[in-house]
Image: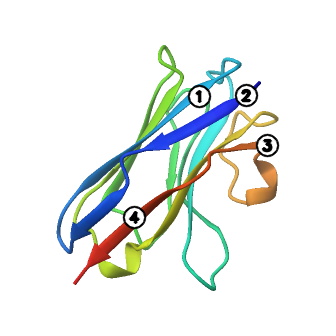
Amino acid sequence: QVQLVESGGGLVQAGGSLRLSCAASGRTFSSYAMGWFRQAPGKERQLVAGTDWSGGSTYYADSVKGRFTISRDNAKNTVYLQMNSLKPEDTAVYYCAVAVGLRRIGVRPTEYDYWGQGTQVTVSS
């Protein structure tokens, strides 16, 4: 059974940092694209950061460029999201996802096949 388990969310003041982790189990995801999405109340789920199968190519939403960094450790079947200079507008539930059919980065949620349960990130002003 495939599982993605996120951790590292929480409450932080504006300007602070958090590091999210997503550990995958059930199969090896080293050949597939992985991404971090977020969804705030009343808003659509959007891709925040993505990485191709190797980690050599990454994507960032304009709103997080220069503040967030995605990385992956294929040996550990884990993807990370380092979030710095957090803002109140970063508040959302963050989900990691894997696109089994893709080696490149997918930007649409429909391109991803497996999802974690989500972790809440709350940034206070």
Of the image marks 4 and 3, the number of the one nearer the N terminus: 3
Quadrant showing the N terminus: top right
Q: Nearer the viewer, residue 26 or 86?
A: 26
Quadrant showing the C terminus: bottom left
Of the image marks 3 and 1, the number of the one nearer the N terminus: 1
Q: Amino acid at mark 2?
A: Val
- Residue assigned mark 4: 121
Q: Amino acid at mark 1?
A: Ala
- Residue assigned mark 2: 2
Distance (Cα) linking label 4 and label 3:
23 Å
Residue 71 horizontal/vertical position (percent): 42, 37
Q: Which mark is residue 24?
A: 1
Residue 77, located in which quarter of the rendered image?
Answer: top right
Q: Secondary structure at mark 1?
A: strand
The residue located at (65%, 37%) in the rendering is 33
Circle 2 residues within 10 Å: few <14, some 14–19, many ≥20: few
> In the image, which is nearer the foreground, mark 4 or mark 3?
4
Circle 3 residues within 10 Å: few <14, some 14–19, many ≥20: few
Of the image marks 4 and 1, the number of the one nearer the N terminus: 1
In this picture, is 88 found above or below 79?
below
Which color mode does the image show? rainbow
Circle 4 residues within 10 Å: few <14, some 14–19, many ≥20: many
Q: Amino acid at mark 3?
A: Asp
Q: Are marks 1 and 2 in contact (CB under 8 Å)?
A: yes
The residue located at (33%, 59%) in the rendering is 10
- Residue assigned mark 3: 113
> In the image, which is nearer the foreground, mark 3 or mark 1?
1
Q: Secondary structure at mark 4?
A: strand
Residue 120 horizontal/vertical position (percent): 45, 62
Q: Amino acid at mark 4?
A: Val
Distance (Cα) linking label 1 and label 2:
7 Å
